[in-house]
Image (cartoon, grey):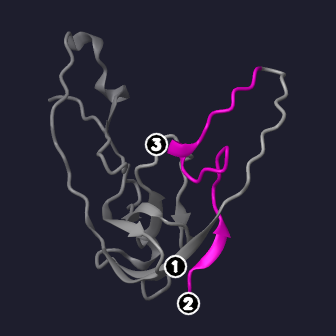
Amino acid sequence: DKPQLIYTTTYYPGATGVAEAVAVHVADGAEVRGIDVKLAKVNAVSIRGTVVDPGGPPESRAFPQLRPRNSPGSPNMSFGSSLQQDGSFVFAAVPPGSYDLVAQRSSTGSQGPTAMALLPIEVRDKNLDGIVLQVKPTPDLQGTVKMEPASQCDARNMSVSLAPANGIYYYGSVQPAR
């Protein structure tokens, strides 16, 4: 199939990216006239692939998501896809840009993904076919959080989060010191 022409997210004055957008300042209760946003059309493509998740039971398989990358200030959006029994997926009508293709699996009772795959991709003017996302167990990171004075800290009400550059967050609970 060929790329299809779709309307894409458009910012004033007709920009398709936040970096090119122009802010419109409107005071409380005021009206602003003469602001027209012409919706932009772009060629969108399909992304086809397979999630390989050898450790995942069928009821908790890792589902794929497509997340825009390097778009500060843009709405937090992602594309979802259904996952077929054979692990195949299709994202349709994806506009050009930089994305992270992610598949995550969580186990019952876990506070974050227990296995995942991440693949940075660039969408341009052609469909992407044959992508394979190999899901692997997420590593555990162990360390110590020290607060001084220790008497002012209750670790039972504390959590630690890691925020890597790829935008995928992992949350874990803090275990009291022994």
CA separation in Å, label 2 and label 1: 8 Å
Residues at marks 1 and 3 touching, judged by CB atoms closer than 8 Å: no
Q: Which mark is residue 46?
A: 1
Q: Which of the two labelled residues, at mark 1 and mark 3, occupies the earlier sequence position?
A: 1
Residue at image location 42% in from the left, 61% down from the top? 99
Examine the structure image and report whether residue 15 is included in the region drawn in magenta: yes
Label 2 crowd bin: few (<14), some (14–19), many (20+), radius 10 Å: few
Amino acid type of disc 1? Ser
Examine the structure image and report whether residue 11 is included in the region drawn in magenta: yes
Q: Position of residue 65 (x, y in %)?
A: 47, 65
Q: Nearer the viewer, residue 61 or 92?
A: 92
Label 3 crowd bin: few (<14), some (14–19), many (20+), radius 10 Å: few
Q: Position of residue 3 (x, y in %)?
A: 56, 80
Residues at marks 2 and 3 touching, judged by CB atoms closer than 8 Å: no
Q: Which mark is residue 72?
A: 3
Residues at marks 2 and 1 touching, judged by CB atoms closer than 8 Å: yes
Secondary structure beneath dot 1 equals strand
Residue at image location 42% in from the left, 73% down from the top? 61
| As drawn, 153 above or below 59 | above
Amino acid type of disc 3? Pro
Q: Which residues are magenta?
A: 1-27
